[in-house]
Image (spheres, rainbow, N blue to C red):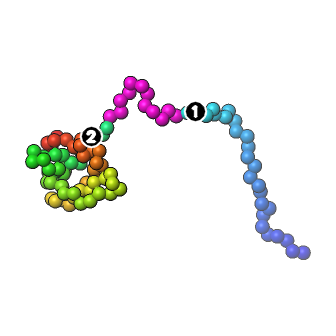
Amino acid sequence: MITDARAPQRTATRRPSARAPRAATATPTADPPGEVRSTPRIVSAFRGVDGKLHHSRCGRPIELVGVRGGIELDFRCIGCWEHVTLTQAALARVPVGRE
């Protein structure tokens, strides 16, 4: 007589949950009225008194390397060679002088 050495397979049964079902809630997509969302400060670069963009970490000028996706400007610091990315919209908000 040939017997199967494997144990019989058990099927998983789902037990009913003791918790009550939750009601679906809608998440608001817009800001509540009267609340103003602030834009983040730009801390990676600043505009010097000479009008050029400078790297905040070392204070050296940064040069434009290229544009990505038509909205992001890639810069490279001429002192420490760190890569800095700014959007075209953020370029107008770059602070003047080092803080």
Q: Which mark is residue 25?
A: 1
Tell me the residue that label 2 is attached to.
Answer: 41
When the figure is inspected, residue 38 is found, relative to residue 50, above or below; the finding is above
Tell me the kind of residue under disc 2. Answer: Arg
Query: Residue 12 at what x, y percent from top left?
Result: 74, 52
Q: Residues within 10 Å of mark 1 (few under 14, many from 20)?
A: few
Q: Which mark is residue 4?
A: none
Q: Quadrant of residue 76?
A: bottom left
Name the residue rendered at 78%, 67% in the picture: 6
Tell me the kind of residue under disc 1. Answer: Thr
Name the residue rendered at 16%, 59% in the picture: 78
Of residues 17 and 41, the one nearer the viewer is 41
Classify mark 1: helix, strand or loop.
loop
Q: Which residues are magenta?
A: 27-38
Q: Residues within 10 Å of mark 2 (few under 14, many from 20)?
A: few
Classify mark 2: helix, strand or loop.
loop
Query: Residue 91 at what x, y percent from top left?
Result: 24, 46
Magenta run includes residue 88: no
- Residue that extends furthest to the front in the rendered view of this protein: 70
Q: Marks 1 and 2, Cα distance to the nearest angstrom?
A: 33 Å
Q: Quadrant of residue 32?
A: top left
